[in-house]
Image (cartoon, rainbow, N blue to C red):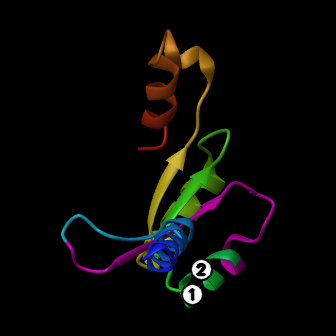
Amino acid sequence: MKKYLTVFFAALTLLFCCGCVIDPNGNKPVLGVWWWDGSLSADTYLSFAEENGVNEVYYCDDGFNGQTESFIKNASDRGMKVYWLAGEYQWLRNDEPLYALIDGFV
């Protein structure tokens, strides 16, 4: 019994470590990856991700700019969702600069 539980938890851990879970509607597996290195070629990175079934990218960047916008559009064109992750500790007290930054690109 202990052997089966060990195998079960190892498989479960592997599943979550790979970022592969079933989406809320139960349709298809969600395979997500983190990307925080803006110096990499977005085209090369997204091609590799697309070839490996990635459909969500958790993109960390220090500011929303033309490069970020281009990356999100490129990934979206390939059928990937992009979650832009950014933050400044000052936004805890005053979130207006964040909304002004986003409004400038929307």
Name the residue rendered at 48%, 43% in the picture.
105
Question: How dense is the environment of label 1, judged by Cα within 10 Å: few (below 14), some, or many (20 and up)?
Answer: few
Where the N terminus falls, by quadrant? Answer: bottom left
Residue 82, how many percent across, how many down? Answer: 47, 60
Identify residue type, mark 1: Asn
Name the residue rendered at 49%, 11% in the picture.
94
Alpha-carbon span between mark 1 and mark 2: 5 Å
Relative height, residue 69 to residue 12 (above, below): above
The magenta stretch spans which residues? Answer: 26-44
In the image, which disc is placed on residue 52? Answer: 1
Residue of label 2: 49
Residue 21, how many percent across, how many down? Answer: 38, 70
Residue 60 is covered by the magenta coloring = no
Label 2 secondary element: helix
Question: How dense is the environment of label 2, judged by Cα within 10 Å: few (below 14), some, or many (20 and up)?
Answer: many
Label 1 secondary element: loop
Is disc 1 in contact with disc 2, using a CB cutoff of under 8 Å?
A: yes
Residue 17 placement: quadrant: bottom right
